[in-house]
Amino acid sequence: MSVTEQPPPHPGPQGDGHAHDGAAADAAVAQLRDRISADSLTTRRDYLRIVATVSGGLAIGGVGVAAGILHRHGDSEHLPEPKKITDQLAPGQSVAFRFPGEDDRALAVRLGDGSLVGYSAVCTHLACGVLWREDRGADGELYCPCHEGVFDARTGEVTAGPPPRPLPRIFLTEQADGSVWAVATARSGESAKEALCRQFSETRPDEAARLGCPGAGRAGAPERRPT
Ligand code: FES
């Protein structure tokens, strides 16, 4: 999970065009941003609690699809720990990082209007490294030099070349001190809610239920005794 999706003044990774999903995603990331301390790592429990507070309607659409080559972003069945990726990121700049694992190449970009977006940096064609090109297009481009693949910087969608799928989204948030954190990923075609539900379903059924995940709470629901 782009994730991705930032509230003003730095709107985050973009959704798939569904305004409702984007607004809900903004709220979710805002919650995360407010709670992730720049001075100390948020504990996993805190993080899950924050996510769980963002119930009904939480969905970040337009999450890109990994190519299925090697390891894919979003494959984990568990939410990753939030990870600080940079102290500052100015408009037009990018930063490479690894998330959620040390083998997962990723890229964060601050677009010219302040939007913050994050993606897997592994091209969905043949897994070459994707680069940020600020000088190309109105918003800049995510460019794969191997076979001239191009991805939309706001959505991760393929705009040119052979890549068969969009770049997988990495959800980012920004702290008051300007530090940028990666907080989640999603699989191909998953909304944020779908991604969270998948990752909560096995390990945190209570959180899944609070998010309104399909099927959540059925298996473990307490049996009601007749009075
Ligand atoms: Fe990226 Fe071919 S590997 S376009």
Image: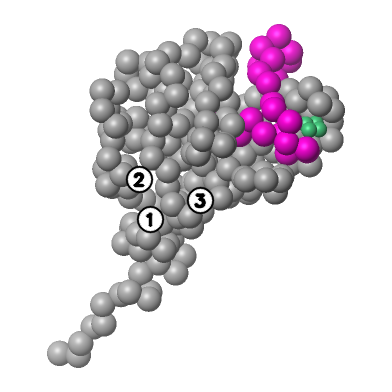
Residue extending farthest to the bottom is 226
* Residue at 38%, 40% in the rendered image: 81
User: Which residue corresponds to mark 1?
Assistant: 211
Where residue 198 appears, as percent x and y from the top left, is 48, 57
Residue kind at label 2, given as amino acid type? Val
The nearer-to-camera label among 1 and 2 is: 2
What residue would you read off at disc 2?
Answer: 51
Q: Which residue is drawn at 69% across and 26% down?
A: 130
Q: Is residue 89 visible?
A: yes
Foreground mark, 2 or 3, reads 3
In this rendered view, identify the residue nearer to me: 91 or 77. Answer: 77
What is the span of residues highlighted in magenta in the rendered image? 118-141
163 to the left or right of 103: right
Q: In which quarter of the image is residue 117?
A: top right
- Amino acid, disc 3: Ser
- Mark 3 vs ligand 1: CB under 8 Å? no
Comes first in the chain, label 3 or label 1: 3
Q: Earlier in the sequence, mark 2 or mark 3?
A: 2
Which badge, 1 or 2, is on the more N-terminal residue?
A: 2
- Disc 1 and disc 2 in contact, CB within 8 angstroms: yes
Q: Residue at x 66, y 18 (%)?
A: 132
Q: Is the magenta stretch mostly helix, strand or loop?
A: loop
